Amino acid sequence: MAAEKAAVAGLTSGPIYSGTQALPPRKIKLIGVPLDMGASRRGVDMGPSAVRVAGLEARLEALGHQVTDGGNISVAIAETKHSGEQNARYLQEITETCTKAAGMVTKALEQGMTPLVIGGDHSVAAGSVSGVAEYYRHQNQRIGLLWIDAHGDMNTPETSPSGNVHGMPLAALLGLGPESLANICGWSPKVLPENTVLIGVRDIDATEKENIKRAGVTEVYTMRDIDERGMRTVMEEALRAAGRGTAGYHVSLDMDWIDPEDAPGVGTPVRGGATYREAHLAMEIIADHGRMVSFELVEVNPVIDEHNRTADLAVELICSAFGKKIL
């Protein structure tokens, strides 16, 4: 346990007592990335504000963590820009935003803080994961990646049926492209396929399936796997794969992973997702293992939400990932 804790950035002194396990408090750097240029439906640019309004900082501090809000990264406004190539719309602007995000994430880790990135659409992950990978590369270490999402996000401009870049960030991180996103920080790939795990996918394009195979990602847990085997078994296997030979893992949580009954305000809702309790259990297991090095949450869309309850749930899940338990 001591070795695992030492590998995790942003820990402060003194335990948080939660259940039977004492979890170390962290110094957390909150980074908002109000990017919505990667999707067709607008509104997720307000996600960081909605999550803040739901009390994120205060609720994390109530757990004993120290939270510093770094504000929002500046993002271009879609209406003032040309969308560019239709198979990867706004790719230049998205790459610029992700490059800024990567720099802020790397700096947070250098300052001994745990990055907590709030999007925005899921294309922001190309920046946040790049920043984490860049930091650990300088320590001669690599990271694992938990991609918790209804979608695979493994399209490239050549395979995407929509041209929406928020369906491409995982492909970029694994080195498939698009090239500008893949080469943030000047190198690629950011994660190895054997340390990359998809959890809860249920809506994957036909061409995207081929990209998953081509990238060599074998740890893919669909909602059927969760239905048949249970969340605990899936998460334990996922964490072993992401943690094998790594400094720890980045958690990338898309709120559309959760069923729309519990999370209606998301960018691309898909029926049949994780339940309220399954989602909390997954986050609690991540906290139990103690090897999470960074966290991001994306795709909260207040425009189609109901009384901000998706953002409220987002805050609850973040708190569970950072150590909150029932007892």
Image (cartoon, grey):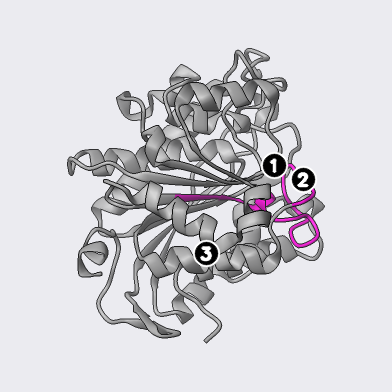
Q: Which residue is drawn at 79% across and 57% down?
A: 305
User: Which amino acid is tagged 2?
Assistant: Val
The percent coordinates of residue 58 (x first, y second) are 52, 75
In three-dimensional space, the C-alpha distance between marks 1 and 2, rounded to whole angstroms, equals: 8 Å
Residue that numbered label 1 is attached to = 202
Residue 170 percent location from the top left of the image:
51, 33
Q: Residue at x 70, y 28 (%)?
A: 79
Q: Type of residue at label 1?
A: Arg
Residue where numbered disc 3 is placed = 283
Taking 5 as reference, is 319 left or right?
right
| Crowdedness near tag 2: few (<14), some (14–19) or many (≥20) residues, C-alpha within 10 Å | some
Between disc 1 and disc 3, the foreground one is 1
**Label pair 3/2, CB-CB below 8 angstroms:** no
Read off the magenta span.
Answer: 251-272
What's the mark number on residue 270? Answer: 2
Q: Can residue 249 be seen in this view?
A: yes
Number of numbered labels in the structure image: 3
